[in-house]
Amino acid sequence: MKRLLLLLTLLSTLTFAKLNVVASYPYLGKIVQAIGGDNVHVKVLASPKRDPHFVIPKPSLIPAIARAQLLVANGAGLEIGWLPPLLKSANNPKVRIGSQGFLDISRAIHLIDVPKSVSRSMGDIHPEGNPHFDTDPHNVLPMAKRIAKKLSALDASHQKEYQDNLKAFTQKWKQFLHTFDAGMKSCKGKKVIQYHELYNYLLKRYGIKSVANIEPLPGIAPSSKHTLELIQQMRKEHITTILQDPYHEKKTARFIAGKTDAKVVVLPHDVGSVSGTKSLESFYTTIRERLCH
């Protein structure tokens, strides 16, 4: 009798055990949770308040990776500086790069800004293309589909639930996109400058022209010469909007704005990066409201 109870307890534990999933960034955690529902436990590695290129590989993150059955990464080189050391320390073959439990979500996206050649003289350029595709809400559904497929492959016993969740999420997100697209129409044709090329996917989608960057090259701090040239260009082309992300220094953007009568618009780059963006919907709605007010 005791053996039978022990067996039933063990079977019950196995039946209701959740799939341990690690996501590199908050937006991915939200999509995984939406598709996985009650069948997944999600741990996000990066803070939305920090530069996504330079996440500190804290030892406290290692246990979650060591227990993980699935790791969902942004890919396209965005995690190259911090994720490999964590994977090495966690020593979990299930989620190593290239394993069944490792999902590079950039494979679901048509990457833009792919350089024809790469050299150190070009700054911290991404050879595979621009990795900041999360700023375009139309990229959410391809990512959700890829995540649902991977969850179903790893946890076939809950495949129907994952597919049902995907169907419900897809219907809801298409309705959201309809509203979002309508709200972005007033921005078409607008000219902006950015600090870093974080919003290219969004800007290209909605016909907004990114004329120049505050960074002279990716990852390179603005020089006085470049800043003055930028001011002259903005005056000449009557550019009145500067897109500033939450984590880069803001002094240069304010200086340029003061010399050109431009407005500095702080846009979130991920879920939770600015106040009031704890959900996917509020993340994108905040982008629309601040950019196309």
Image (tube, helix red, strand yellow):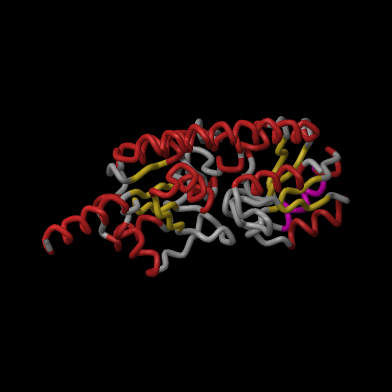
**The one of 166 and 7 positioned closer to us in this rendering:** 7
Can you give x and y, in whole percent of width and height, for residue 196 in the image? 63, 49
Report the side of 40 relative to 121 (left or right).
Answer: left
Can you give x and y, in whole percent of width and height, for residue 262 in the image? 84, 49
Q: Residue at x 65, y 52 (%)?
A: 268
User: Do we see residue 137 in this rendering?
Assistant: yes
Can you give x and y, in whole percent of width and height, for residue 102 in the image? 34, 45
- In the rendered image, the residue lying farthest to the right is 261
Q: Quadrant of the N terminus?
A: bottom left
**The one of 57 and 262 positioned closer to us in this rendering:** 57
Q: Residue at x 82, y 43 (%)?
A: 293
- Residue 65 to residue 120: above or below: below
Q: Main secondary structure of the magenta part?
A: helix
Q: Which residues are magenta?
A: 224-233
- In the rendered image, the residue lying farthest to the front is 1
Report the side of 32 relative to 230 (left or right).
Answer: left
Report the side of 19 relative to 53 (left or right).
Answer: left
User: Do we see residue 116 in this rendering?
Assistant: no
Q: Residue at x 68, y 30 (%)?
A: 178
In magenta segment, residue 213: no
**The one of 80 and 60 positioned closer to us in this rendering:** 60
Q: Residue at x 61, y 31 (%)?
A: 174
In magenta segment, residue 227: yes
Can you give x and y, in whole percent of width and height, for residue 185 in the image? 77, 31
Image quadrant where residue 249 sits: bottom right
- Residue 264 to residue 49: above or below: above
Report the side of 132 relative to 258 (left or right).
Answer: left
What number of labels is visible? Answer: 0
**The one of 98 and 113 positioned closer to us in this rendering:** 98
